[in-house]
Amino acid sequence: MFKINENYQKLPGSYLFSTIAKKVAAFTQANPDKDIIRLGIGDVTQPLAPAVIEAMHKAVDEMGSAETFHGYAPDLGYEFLRNAIVEHDYTSRGCDIAPDEIFVSDGAKSDSANIQEIFGADNKIAVCDPVYPVYVDSNVMSGRTGVYNAETETWSDVIYMPCTMENGFVPEFPKETPDMIYLCLPNNPTGTTITKAKLQEWVDYANRVGAVIIYDGAYEAYISEEDVAHSIYECEGAKTCAIELKSFSKNAGFTGVRLGYTVVPKELKCQDVSLHGMWARRHGTKFNGAPYIVQRAGEATYSKEGRAQLQEQVAYYMKNAAVIKTGLKDAGYTVFGGVNAPYIWLKTPDNMTSWEFFDYLLERANVVGTPGSGFGPSGEGYFRLTAFGSSENTLAAIERVKKL
């Protein structure tokens, strides 16, 4: 008889956003007359930038001619895209990253789940709490997290770094030494971040204890404060301890197009074994590359026109964030985030649990958000709203919340 991966049976419930979708679908079916405004999942709503559309049209035409047709993409991604990434995301910020240290993929979510494959099952992971669920769930699937405690909603072999109102939602060095440290900055779900000086402390700590940092910079484009790093490689020594994940989803609206990249420096080694070589082997074996059309679209985001258009989109969403944050504060809520990230993190009122507030908002205001407890035990009592809706829906949603 065939065997299954028993680790999957350890996962409690379904994926967070699948659970939310099912609850909203059930409510909609029971209340077909209600107009639901969704500010839960972090999905963009603005159309692709004109420069991106133009590049995609051109690439489609190229695929229609034998002379310019493209089949399988190179393992690492096309040079034109990797060179653009290096120039604009790294060299311009004083980071020494080479084009062959860039691995183009179909998105940061895939990479954040897959990267754990190159690490041993006995590595101890440390995560911020609350945390993007994929980091923990993918390690559960690989058998790295131990036993689940339903009462505390924690895993026995995971080191949790509480990020709460009391510590400004900034992780502190754990008492137990980890092997792998997941950092998402600016943070999903809290919307908060840390200074470059504080990030340097994490790099120094990782190098000192022999840990590797999995650094998710998916929301880098939303950074507005001067003392916040746009890449972990702005910190001295990061190339010997950090892997960086980047996405085109939130900065360029590629949630439905799918494109991202991971940086694995050649200096990053476990004794004499190169993690760059390991990821290259995994990447070449299990991935056939992002489509040529999509990579040309990615290249267009770095053009002069593309960069200007994307800045307008980021400003659009951050205006929504300001509307949400100001509106909630006016309504008496305790609110965080919304400055360097398109997420608003709020304290649930009247001692409601996160899921109680989810139901309350859905039923009374017909607004969908994300329960904080879905991101980890320290998320209980908090709630996340995204700024990725249309400006009209964002304004309407906040007006509904104010009337509660």
Image (cartoon, rainbow, N blue to C red):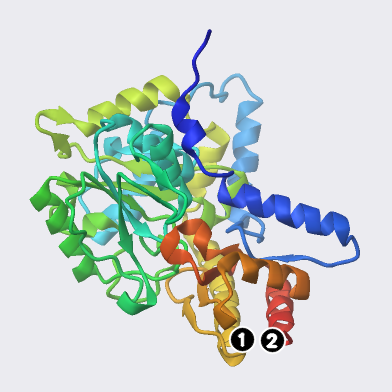
The reply to whether discs 1 and 2 touch (Cβ–Cβ < 8 Å) is yes
How many marks do you count on the picture? 2
Which residue is at the far front?
151
The answer to whether residue 277 of the structure is visible from this angle is: yes
Which residue is at the far right?
33
- 90 and 128: which is toward the camera: 128
Left or right relative to 35: residue 236: left
Structural crowding at the residue carrying mark 1, measured as other residues with C-alpha within 10 Å and reported as few (<14), some (14–19) or many (≥20): some
User: Compared with residue 226, is residue 182 higher up or lower down, i.e. above or below?
Assistant: above
User: Compared with residue 138, is residue 393 higher up or lower down, i.e. above or below?
Assistant: below
Task: Residue 112 in the image: state x and y as whole percent.
Answer: 40, 43
Task: Residue 181 in the image: state x and y as whole percent.
Answer: 27, 50
Task: Residue 144 in the image: state x and y as whole percent.
Answer: 33, 36
Residue at (38% x, 41% y) in the render:
147
Task: Identify the residue position indicated by label 2 in the image.
Answer: 402
Residue at (49% x, 50% y) in the render:
248
